[in-house]
C-alpha cells in the first residue's frame, strides 16, 4: 500500500451508467496515456496537451478503438494526490470500463487499493489525517448536519486549531528544555504563569472537542430517539407513521414487540434514529423480559425519549405511568423527554393533572405525526452549528489521552517538579495531539484508516 507504483481504479459506483470515471496516479501516468490516447485536435499528441485542461479523444489499443472519452491532464504537485494524474471520463458500459482497466494493467499500471489515492495525498502533504477522514465522512454523509461537519473537517477547521495549540505548546516545551542547559544559573526562559494559562486554554479546547464526540457521533449515525411506554399504547404504529412504512408489526395483542426495531429518518437536515421498544410491564414471559431489558438499555443510550401513554386507559394507570415518567426525568435530567398521549381521537374530553406539557395525537394521523416531528425539532437543545465537532473514535481516544497528560503537567507545575520531568509529560501531550492530525503516526495506523475508505478515493 505504500509503494510508488502508478495506480488506477474505476472511481464511479459499480455497474452500468451514462458516464464512468477512471483515475490514474503516479509517475507513469502521462507516459502510458501517450501510448493509448489520441486527441481529437489535429496534429496533436498527448504530450502536446496543456496540463490542467480537459480534452476529447480516443482510447485505443493498437488499431482497436475502445471508446471516445474526455481526459483531464494533471501534473504534480497540483493534483489531488500530489502526483501526476489523469482522469478518464468514458461511457458507463461495464465492458468499456473493464477494457480500459485491462489496457492500463497491460502497460504496467496496477489497480489501486481502497483509500490509496487519499493515502498518497496525505503522504505527499496535500492534507492531514483529519482532512483525509473528513473526505470519507463527506462521501458517507446522509444529512445536512453530517455533511456540514464533514465539510468543516475536510477544510481543516479542526486541524488548524489543533496545530495552533500544538505549536504553542511545542515552543514552550523548547524553552523549558533550554532551561536545562542553564540549570546551574537558575534561569527561567518560560514564564510559569504564561505556561499555566496556555495549558488551561488547551485543556478547555480539548475538553470541548471530547465532549462534542457523543453528540457528534449521534449526528453522524442518527440522533437516537426511543419510543417508550406500556404495551399496546401505539409505539409501533407511531414508528410506522414517522417512517411512512410498515417497519414494525402492529397488533391489538399486548407484547407484540419483543425486540428493538429501529430505522433512521431525516428531519430538517438532521438524521434521527427512531427506536421502537418492547412495552414495559411485569411479565413471566422470558423472551418479553429480554425485550424489556433492551428497552431500558435503549433509554439509557438515547438522546430523546418519546414517552407514550394511552389516553383511553384508566385514571389509575395514567397516574402510574406519569409517576414512572417523573422517575425517568429525575434519572435523565440531560435527556429530552416528551410526553405523548395517544388515541386522543377516541376520547372526547379528559382532564389529566400533570405539570408536564403533553402532546395529544392519533398515531395514525399524518397531521398529528408531523406536529410531533416539529415539536422534536423545536425542543432539541443541542446547537453545534458554530462549534467544532469530532465524530471519529480515533480522535476521541487521542484527545482524551492528551487531556489526561495536560492534567499531569498542571499537577507537576503545582508541585514545582523539575523541568526535565515536566517535559516528559509535555511531550506526551504533543504526541497525542500529533496523533490526531497525523504528524505522529505509523504504517499500521495508516493502513487501518485508509483501508476503510471506498475504492477510488
Image (tube, rainbow, N blue to C red):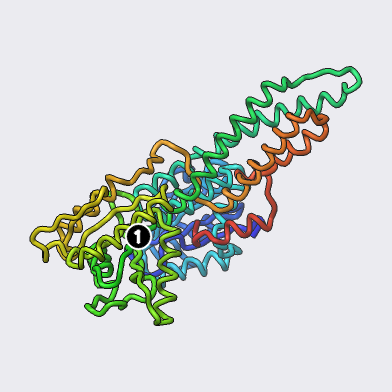
Pinpoint residue 362: horizontal percent, then vertical percent: 16, 62
Pinpoint residue 175: horizontal percent, then vertical percent: 76, 25
Residue 324 is left or right of residue 366, and the answer is right
- The answer to whether 253 is drawn above or below residue 301 in the figure is below
Identify the residue shown where x is 74% and y is 21%: 190
- The answer to whether 263 is drawn above or below residue 205 in the figure is below
**Which residue corresponds to mark 1?**
324
Comparing 128 with 290, the one in front is 290
Question: SS at mark 1?
Answer: helix
On the rendered image, what quadrant is the N terminus found in? Answer: bottom right
Pinpoint residue 340: horizontal percent, then vertical percent: 24, 57
Q: Is residue 197 visible?
A: yes
When asked about the image quadrant of residue 348, the answer is: bottom left
When asked about the image quadrant of residue 69, the answer is: bottom left
Q: Is residue 121 visible?
A: no
- The answer to whether 388 is drawn above or below residue 10 in the figure is above
Identify the residue shown where x is 45% and y is 59%: 300
Pinpoint residue 45: horizontal percent, then vertical percent: 48, 51
Residue 213 is left or right of residue 252, and the answer is right
Residue 151 is left or right of residue 111, and the answer is left
Comparing 249 with 33, the one in front is 249
Mark 1, Cα crowd under 10 Å, few <14 / some 14-19 / many 20+, is few
Amino acid at each position: 500500500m505504500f509503494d510508488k507504483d502508478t495506480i488506477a481504479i474505476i472511481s464511479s459506483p459499480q455497474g452500468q451508467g451514462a458516464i464512468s470515471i477512471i483515475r490514474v496516479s503516479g509517475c507513469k501516468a502521462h507516459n502510458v496515456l501517450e501510448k493509448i490516447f489520441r486527441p481529437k485536435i489535429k496534429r496533436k499528441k498527448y504530450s502536446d496537451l496543456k496540463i490542467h485542461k480537459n480534452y476529447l479523444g480516443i482510447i485505443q489499443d493498437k488499431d482497436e478503438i475502445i471508446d471516445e472519452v474526455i481526459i483531464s491532464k494533471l501534473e504534480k504537485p497540483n493534483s489531488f494526490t500530489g502526483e501526476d494524474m489523469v482522469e478518464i471520463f468514458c461511457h458507463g458500459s461495464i465492458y468499456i470500463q473493464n477494457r480500459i482497466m485491462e489496457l492500463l494493467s497491460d502497460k504496467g499500471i496496477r489497480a489501486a487499493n481502497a483509500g490509496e489515492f487519499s493515502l498518497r495525498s496525505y503522504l505527499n502533504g496535500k492534507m492531514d489525517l483529519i482532512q483525509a477522514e473528513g473526505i470519507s465522512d463527506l462521501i458517507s454523509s446522509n444529512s445536512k448536519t453530517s455533511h456540514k461537519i464533514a465539510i468543516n473537517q475536510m477544510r481543516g477547521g479542526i486541524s488548524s486549531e489543533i496545530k495552533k495549540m500544538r505549536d504553542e505548546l511545542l515552543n514552550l516545551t523548547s524553552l523549558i528544555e533550554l532551561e536545562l542547559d542553564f540549570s546551574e544559573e537558575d534561569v527561567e526562559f518560560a514564564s510559569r504563569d504564561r505556561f499555566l494559562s496556555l495549558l488551561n486554554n488547551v485543556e478547555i479546547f480539548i475538553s470541548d472537542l471530547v465532549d462534542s464526540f457523543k453528540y457528534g457521533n449521534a449526528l453522524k449515525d442518527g440522533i437516537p430517539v426511543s419510543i417508550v411506554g406500556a404495551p399496546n399504547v401505539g409505539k409501533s404504529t407511531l414508528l410506522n407513521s414517522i417512517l411512512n412504512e410498515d417497519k414494525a408489526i402492529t397488533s391489538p395483542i399486548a407484547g407484540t414487540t419483543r425486540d428493538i426495531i429501529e430505522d433512521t429518518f431525516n428531519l430538517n437536515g438532521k438524521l434521527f434514529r427512531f427506536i421502537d421498544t418492547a412495552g414495559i410491564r411485569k411479565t413471566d414471559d422470558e423472551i418479553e423480559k429480554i425485550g424489556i431489558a433492551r428497552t431500558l438499555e435503549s433509554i439509557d443510550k438515547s438522546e430523546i425519549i418519546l414517552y407514550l401513554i394511552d389516553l383511553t386507559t384508566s385514571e389509575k394507570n395514567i397516574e402510574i405511568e406519569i409517576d414512572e415518567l417523573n422517575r425517568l426525568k429525575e434519572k435523565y435530567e440531560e435527556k429530552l423527554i416528551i410526553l405523548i398521549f395517544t388515541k386522543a381521537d377516541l376520547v372526547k374530553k379528559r382532564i389529566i393533572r400533570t405539570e408536564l406539557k403533553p402532546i395529544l395525537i392519533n398515531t395514525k394521523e399524518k397531521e398529528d405525526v408531523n406536529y410531533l416531528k416539529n415539536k422534536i425539532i423545536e425542543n432539541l437543545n443541542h446547537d453545534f452549528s458554530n462549534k467544532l465537532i469530532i465524530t471519529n473514535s480515533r480522535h476521541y481516544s487521542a484527545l482524551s489521552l492528551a487531556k489526561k497528560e495536560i492534567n499531569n503537567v498542571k499537577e507537576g507545575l503545582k508541585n514545582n517538579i523539575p523541568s526535565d520531568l515536566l517535559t516528559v509529560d509535555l511531550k506526551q501531550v504533543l504526541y497525542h495531539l500529533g496523533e490526531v492530525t497525523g504528524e505522529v503516526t505509523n504504517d499500521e495506523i495508516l493502513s487501518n484508516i485508509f483501508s476503510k475508505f471506498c475504492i477510488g478515493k
